Amino acid sequence: MTNKYSQGNAMFAITRASLRSISRNPSAIVFNLIFPLIFIIVFGFISGGGFVIEVAIDKNSDANNEIYGALEKINSVKLLKDRSHEEITGELSKGRIDAELKLSRNDKGTLVVELTTSKASPERGNIFKMMLNEIVSRQNLSASIPPAIELKENTIEGRKFTMIDFILPGQLGFSLLSAGVFGTAFVFISLRQTQVIKRFFATPVKRMYIILGESLSRLIFSMFSSVIIILIGTFFFGFTLVNGVVTFLNMLALSVIALIVFLGFGFVVSGIAKNESAVPPIANLITLPQFLLAGTFFPISNFPEWLQPVSKALPLTYLNEALRKISFEGAGLFDVWKDILILIGWGVIVYAVAIKVFKWE
């Protein structure tokens, strides 16, 4: 009596063989691990940066005054309007905005400027405080009846948001995107050209298990890379994992979801490209715009307003934002369900296209 052929064993055999192939591929190691680590190490030693200072204006503020007008002319300061006091306080304590400003006049007609900063963003908060002090001093010196402006300062508690807390999730996201797009595209082009897939067809293994085996190998390798990236960031550069192991596991779970979506992009590229030399140009059309515009290095609020809708249409943007909410704010997967839903929506679209263009031979 012959034993029944095991599709599962065949799938795991493909996975093991693919993992060995990935581990021997220098480009896979560079794009998935070395390249992100280089940026993490570089930015880990840098504090500060070219960030725009975001200042929330209290909804009850008087905008018809010289202080407000002077702030509007400063390119490095972005004034945020129409936010409730509760929203502003929450974002201040998390370091998502740098200061709150309330402008009002007292019974004597003196302009009262109330500045609130947070310990979550001390560098940019202090920079803005210096800017504001200079503007107030200049206005008071030129006033006919000094002091024309009264400045009040307040600081609230908050977890300090550092450069590495912003950079590491972006590099982790880019690592997953590169693994999904370049890794998948190159391997299936290679399997077609070397007629390995045709040999698979001579065996009882089903097509679905071939794809699952190859995908599982990329998943294992990418999760291994993700673990190294997070641990190095945490232990060497003070990357914030708010809830420790729970946050770490939530980040890995989100990474799995994202990688499954990004594998679809790789299947599309491998279906469109006719040979290996055609893969990089097509893959770069997918990865480079996201690398540059999805908030990998800088907040998308730093970009020109006409460019921000493009950034908000990219799947990597939502992965990066969700990773930062989980790592720094302590959010769970259910708290970032909107970001996950958008990622899944992209996955549905991408896999629908992949089914149309994917070729076995």
Image: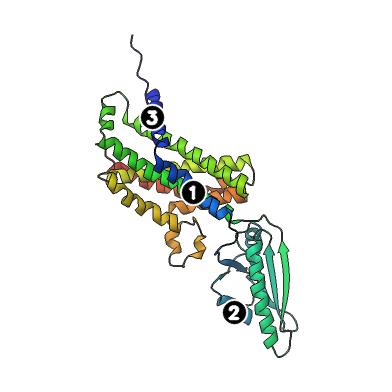
Q: Residues within 10 Å of mark 1 (few under 14, many from 20)?
A: many
> Is the Cβ of the residue at disc 1 closer than 8 Å to that at disc 2?
no
The three-letter code of the residue at mark 1 reads: Pro
Q: Quadrant of the N terminus?
A: top left
Residue 348, by quadrant, is: top left
> Of discs 2 and 3, which sits in the foreground?
3
Q: CA distance from mark 2 to mark 3?
A: 64 Å
Residue 131, by quadrant, is: bottom right
Residue designated by label 3: 17
The three-letter code of the residue at mark 3 reads: Ala
Sequence-wise, the earlier of marks 2 and 3 is: 3
Question: Whole-percent x and y of residue 42?
Answer: 54, 54
Q: Quadrant of the C terminus?
A: top left
Q: Residues within 10 Å of mark 2 (few under 14, many from 20)?
A: few
Q: CA distance from mark 1 to mark 2?
A: 40 Å
Q: Which mark is residue 36?
A: 1
Question: Whole-percent x and y of residue 92?
Answer: 64, 61
Question: Whole-percent x and y of residue 242?
Answer: 64, 47
Sequence-wise, the earlier of marks 1 and 3 is: 3
Residue designated by label 2: 70
Residue at 57% over, 44% down: 232
In the picture, measured across the screen, residue 120 lies left or right of residue 80, that is: right
> Is the Cβ of the residue at disc 1 closer than 8 Å to that at disc 3?
no
The three-letter code of the residue at mark 2 reads: Ala
